[in-house]
Image (spheres, helix red, strand yellow):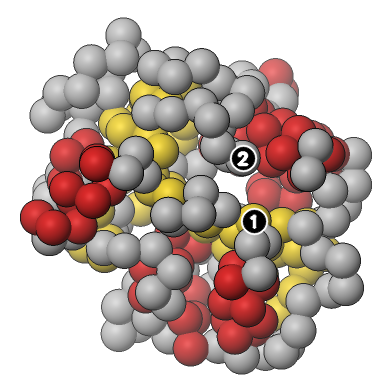
Amino acid sequence: MKSAIIVFPGTNRERDMAIALERASGRKPAMVFHLQDALPPGTDLVVLPGGFSHGDYLRCGAMAAQSPIMRAVRDFAERGGLVLGVCNGFQILTEAGLLPGALLRNATLRFLSMDCHMRVERADTPFTSHWQKGAVFRSPMAHGDGNYFCDDETLARLNGEGLVAFRYATPEGSITPAANRNGARDNIAGILSPTLRICGLMPHPEDLVDPLMGGTDGLPLFTSLLDSLASA
């Protein structure tokens, strides 16, 4: 798996993501600065990691979405390449129009830094195949603007086409308001593109990929990607 991590000014989770990708694949990812206009030859997977790109000025991810490298990311996605956006990366994907909806201020208007639980809504995608549908896993969250919002038509399409990848849930798998700490619409924690080749989510599975990190709950995301590319 030849992966590329996009680094913007203010990105701070690129090393965490690199650890997760290398843990799954045994191969170090390339770090690509946002002012570059091309991805490394042979790239299989592009990852937009978490952080505060451009200081979260204007709107989270809005300035990063206009960076030169994003033209290459769009072209890569249009050719069927795999793209993963986590936290600020999810915000960038929505601002770039690669995923629908928007990430708003948390309903509490407070930054949230804690563990959450997510339920896997489908297990037949390149990002989720190493889970079973309905599986629940723990993941850290750390964001101030993680409140996923979309209009009624978009929500109906996401649900009707099975494009919700993850929902905030209790440890037992129940979808409840209490489990939805940032106020995201319909408890949505992560979504997929219609092609199932782009995924964005707010929590940080990359921070739970080794027992030394406190668990391996997030590792299936990355082994799913490896398996998908190996069988392509």
- In this view, which residue lies farthest toward the top? 172
Q: Position of residue 61 (x, y in %)?
A: 41, 74
**Residue 11 in which image quadrant:** bottom right
Q: Which mark is residue 82?
A: 1
**In the figure, 105 relative to 38: above or below?**
above
Q: Which residue is located at x 76 percent, y 33 percent?
A: 227
Left or right relative to 102: residue 74: right
Percent position of residue 224, x then y:
67, 33
Residue 43 x, y percent position in the rendering: 81, 64
Q: Residue at x 84, y 48 (%)?
A: 1
The answer for how far apart the CA atoms under marks 2 and 1 are is 8 Å
Q: Residue at x 61, y 40 (%)?
A: 126
Q: Which residue is mark 2?
A: 126
Q: Earlier in the sequence, mark 2 or mark 1?
A: 1
Q: Under tag 2, what secondary structure?
A: loop
**On the image, which quarter does residue 193 sit in?**
bottom left
Above-or-below relation of 140 to 117: below
Where residue 181 appears, as percent x and y from the top left, is 21, 37
Can residue 189 be seen? Answer: no
Amino acid type indicated by mark 1: Leu
Relative to 173, does residue 127 appear above or below in the rendering? below
The C terminus appears in which quarter of the rendering? Answer: top right
Front position in the image: 113 or 128: 128
Question: Callout 1: helix, strand or loop?
Answer: strand
Residue type at mark 2 is: Pro
Please say if the residues under marks 2 and 1 sit with CB atoms less than 8 Å apart: yes
Question: Measured along the vertical axis of the image, is residue 125 above or below residue 27?
Answer: above
Q: Which mark is residue 131?
A: none
In the rendered image, is residue 137 in sight? yes
Left/right of residue 73 with respect to residue 123 in the rendered view? right
